[in-house]
Amino acid sequence: MGWGRPSLSLTPKRARRRKSARGDGLWGDQPAKGEKANASRLLALQQAHWRIENRLHYRRDVILGEDACQIRITGAPEALPALNGGVLALMDWLQVPNAASQMRHFCAHPEDALQLLCCKLLR
C-alpha cells in the first residue's frame, strides 16, 4: 500500500460527510491536499487502520462468525451484521472486557441474558 514511502501525499476523501474543526470538510486530521506525511504520521495511520481491523472486524469474524456464516434466507445476510453490531455495541456499553467469554456464558445461560436486558436496560 505504500506505507513505507515517507513522501506519500495524503489527499482529502471525495465523500465528505462532516466538516473538521478547521471547517474544510476533510476527514479527521488529514493534511490538506499537497501536504506530505512524515514517517510518524504514516505510522499513526497504519496503526489506526490495524486498530480498527483488530477491534471491530476481528470481533465480528472470530467471536460472532460473520465470515463463516452461510445463511441464505431472504434479508438475513443484511440483518445479521446489524444484529451483530447491536450485540457488540451493547457489550461495549456494558463495558464487557471479554466479549467472547460473555457470549459463551450467555449461550449457556440465556436466562442471564434476558435478566440483563430486562434489568440493566430498562433502568
Image: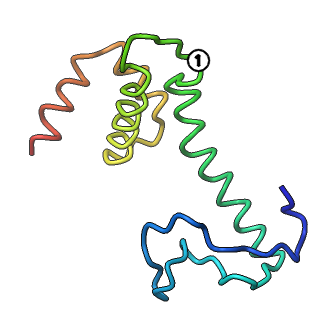
* Residue sitting nearer the eye, 39 or 15: 15
* Residue sitting nearer the eye, 91 or 38: 38
Judging by the rendered image, the residue that carries numbered circle 1 is 68
* Residue drawn where x is 66% and y is 81% of the image: 31
- Mark 1: secondary structure: loop
Q: Is residue 94 above or below residue 69?
A: below
* Residue drawn where x is 49% and y is 78% of the image: 25
Query: Would residue 85 appear left or right of 29 to someone viewing this image?
Result: left
* Residue drawn where x is 74% and y is 60% of the image: 46
Tell me the kind of residue under disc 1: Ala
The picture quadrant where one finds residue 12 is bottom right
* Residue sitting nearer the eye, 104 or 26: 26
Q: Quadrant of the C terminus?
A: top left
Q: Is residue 67 above or below residue 86?
A: above
Q: Is residue 61 above or below residue 52?
A: above
Query: Residue 117's x, y, as percent?
Result: 19, 32
